[in-house]
Amino acid sequence: MLSGMRYSFECKTAAVIAFVFLLQDFGIEGRLIQGTNVNLGEALQFLREYSNEGSEMCFRLNTARWNYATNMTEINKKRMIDEQTHKAKFDKVSWKKAITFDWTHLSDPVAKRQLKILATTGRASLNDEKYNEIHHLVSEMKDVYSHTQVCPFNNFDPQFCNISLEPDISRLMSHSKNPAELLHLWKEWHDKIGPRLKNKFMRYVQLANQAARMIGFSDAGDQMRHVYEDAVFEREVMETWRTLEELYKEIFTYVRRKLLTKYGPEFVRENGPIPVHLLGDLWGQDWSKIFDILKPYSWSKDVDVTSEMLLQGYTPLKMYQLAEEFYTSLGLKSMPPEFWKNSLFDKPNDRKIQCTASAWDFCNGVDYRIKQCTKVDLQDFVTAHHEMAHIQYYMHYAEQPYLYRDGANPGFHEGIANAIVLSISNPTHLQRIGLIRNESNAFETNIQFLLQMALKKVSYAPFAFLVDQWRYKVFKEGVKNMNSAWWDLRLRYQGIIPPDLRTEQQLDPMSKKHVPADIPYINYYIALLVEFQVYESLCAAKGHIGQLHTCDFYKSREVGSILSDAMQVGKARHWKDVIRMITKGQSDSISASSMLKYFQPLQQWLHLQNTNEEIIGWNVSSDDRMLFQPLQSKSNSVRYATFPLIILLVSGLII
Ligand SMILES: *[C@@H]1O[C@H](CO)[C@@H](O)[C@H](O)[C@H]1NC(C)=O
Ligand SMILES: *[C@@H]1O[C@H](CO)[C@@H](O)[C@H](O)[C@H]1NC(C)=O
Ligand SMILES: [Zn+2]
């Protein structure tokens, strides 16, 4: 996770190659809002001021956010909200100024691009009243989400109905093996969240669409996708999913067999979709949490890295020092003194804090921090490296103007951090740093490692892919039958069904925080692809031989220099240029082929496991559909079935 104010807008360079993208994008530029001022001097002056004030604003807001996150008092919360309000006003003023320029006709590419980013960002196009309303709505939805509590299993006595998502529901969803309890928790959460948020969400959709249309987008989904500055973005994303689908279905089929064995045909149909509540979390997104059920070799013991860490006297500080050593071994930067002074590695006892690990950029070129309630175990060791990758990224693009201090596209920060994590968390690396003693290159060890990774990454892919498909559809086609549209996508891409009847009274996508919190989701899918693409390229640069998942690029200066070049760019250039830099010209688009390559040995193995299955994937019965489309007529089902195709065609035509 990363923190700080993130802007996500688009990129272009003067490079010849980028010119192609510029042409592609030109059609849309013509309909975006702009003024008449073509005075380049004035534009540059404004952008300089914006960059300074924006950095200052970021410093103040992040200081207030940090103070609250590490000391959750009412006063600190109020100060943070004051800064947020301040920032919202600043955004509005900046937007108004930016749209006085005729930026499509400015010759200077840097000025043009920054103005375009400003003009197409956010919702400042709304009048003051509506602008405040949508900010208020989103913060209300976030509040409802974080304060919703449910009743425990078998006990609806109100005095006990105080179970929260974190840590209780999450823990129970992955630990409980009682299907009745899992169903209860799943249903409680979904039934309490959705109806409470439905009206607010519908108003939010209306306002977000108005804001987007006033800028010149066809709807708010169009505005969200515009960040990727890619006319064929949706088609490319769909193609990557087609590449992954077969692997996903193999894992799905393997998992369904294990669940059938565990829970019986009353819960899992041999050739059908899987009911979501059996998969380890509320959304069926991370199946590694039920690895105990899915383990192929029950006799094999997991390597206990954690006790080795304790034995060797690891502390949170030592974990961060080792993470730093990993980066300096590649020739990347060491952490500045401010980092060691201001970061928070240990959970304090004297106050309430938000423990989610995060990396912070205070936008002044010196102050960078990590907050993590670090436990001495393998997972937190990996997280330490992950968060420090964000700090490396921040430090590398610190010289860029404020608007370019961001990942090349919204998937890059996470993608690069996780690519590095693929190197440091595999057994090869853990052996090199002495956390695994005896080498075990047994076939079974490899398969278990890859299976665990796949249950986290490949199983997550269709979910990461579909959340925004749903959101785009709602923005485009309206709020009618929103809930059945959600389940239609879940069934189509994940092969997942709800554990009980759903209707339009409910609004199940609200169960995932990013939807009410107005946070784009496709970025996570892109990050997943970037992760494996970057990893494969870095491993090639290091000269790795053998199966991809065994590659560790510790101490490789070649890898460091590629990372450093790519991170320095920030978002000053189109992300396709950055992919070209990282892959040394081999590729200029997102692709799932690196991910397939990584999991290739597992895919072969899964295919063997699934030999006797009736179907690799799932058959949909009318009962499955009845769970969420009880009153749907035939013609409606057909409409849903063809929806992605329609979206693709229509957006293809517009752009
Ligand atoms: C926490 O914040 C309060 C203000 O609400 C402040 O008085 C207190 O000193 C802070 N505690 C720490 C440890 O920073
Ligand atoms: C929950 O209630 C059911 C029936 O009311 C009962 O059979 C079951 O034992 C109870 N389970 C727990 C954990 O209390
Ligand atoms: Zn992160």
Image: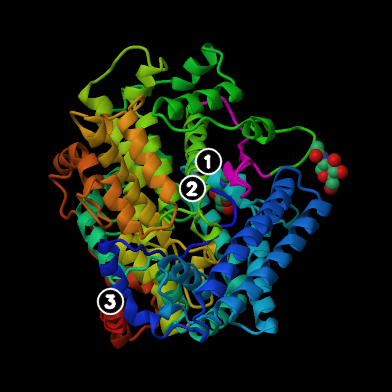
Query: Disc 3 residue type?
Result: Leu
Numbered disc 1: secondary structure: helix
Q: CA distance from mark 1 to mark 3?
A: 37 Å
Q: Nearer the viewer, residue 564 or 501?
A: 564
Crowdedness of circle 2 by 10 Å Cα count: few (<14), some, many (20+)?
A: many
The span shown in magenta is 354-377
User: Tag 3 or tag 1, which sits nearer the N-term?
Assistant: 1
Q: Is residue 29 magenta?
A: no
Which disc is residue 604 wearing?
none
- Residue matched to label 1: 391
Crowdedness of circle 3 by 10 Å Cα count: few (<14), some, many (20+)?
A: some
- Residue 626 seen in the current view: yes
Which disc is residue 397 wearing?
2
Question: Which residue: 26% across, 63% down?
Answer: 16
Tell me if 563 is positioned left or right of 199 in this view: left
Q: CA distance from mark 2 to mark 1?
A: 10 Å
